[in-house]
Image (cartoon, rainbow, N blue to C red):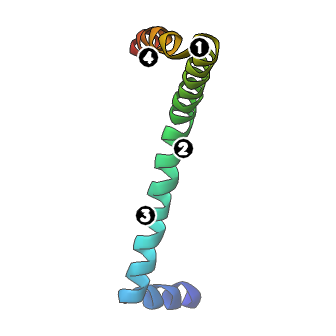
Amino acid sequence: GAAQQTAEIMQDNLKGRIEQLGGALETLGIQFYESVDTPLKTIVENATGMVEQLSKAFEKDGLSGLVEEFGDVLSQAAV
């Protein structure tokens, strides 16, 4: 009816088109975030565990322990 026609007229200008673009970009951003959230969270958790592993090796055996553990961490990361 008249309300829909008024809304269409209000959107049929540059400002309205920019608002539509902003909404579309926001939707894309949400979709992208949702698709990478879990995989990236897993990567960050794994990286944190590896750094903690290196830290413990350094604390226990110094630089030589760190270097040795680094090889193990790299092999884990490659899998």
Instruction: Give percent across and percent down for residue 70.
Output: 45, 14
Mark 2: amino acid: Glu
- Element type at mark 4: helix
Residue at mark 1: 57
Q: Which residue is mark 4?
A: 77
38 relative to 53, above or below: below
Within 10 angstroms of label 1, few (less than 14), some, or many (20 or more) residues? some
Residue 34 numbered mark, or none: 2
Q: Amino acid at mark 3?
A: Leu
Q: Nearer the viewer, residue 28 or 72?
A: 72
Quarter location, residue 79: top left
Q: Foreground mark, 2 or 1?
A: 1
Q: Say whether marks 4 and 3 touch (CB < 8 Å).
A: no
Crowd band around label 3 with a 10 angstrom C-alpha radius: few (<14), some (14–19), many (20+): few
Mark 3: secondary structure: helix
Image marks 2 and 4: residues in contact by CB distance under 8 Å: no
As displayed, is residue 7 above or below residue 41? Answer: below
Secondary structure under badge 1? helix
Give the amino acid at mark 1.
Answer: Ala
Q: Does residue 79 appear in this view? A: no
In three-dimensional space, the C-alpha distance between marks 2 and 1, rounded to whole angstroms, equals 36 Å
| Quarter of the figure with residue 1 | bottom right
Q: Identify which residue is drawn at 51% across, 35% down.
A: 40
Circle 4 packing at 10 Å, graded few (<14), some (14-19), many (20+), is few
Closer to the chain start, of discs 2 and 1, is: 2
Which residue is label 3 attached to?
25
Which of the marked residues, 3 or 1, is nearer the chain's N terminus?
A: 3
For residue 49, side relative to residue 16 (left or right): right
Examine the rendered structure and indicate whether residue 23 appears above or below residue 71: below
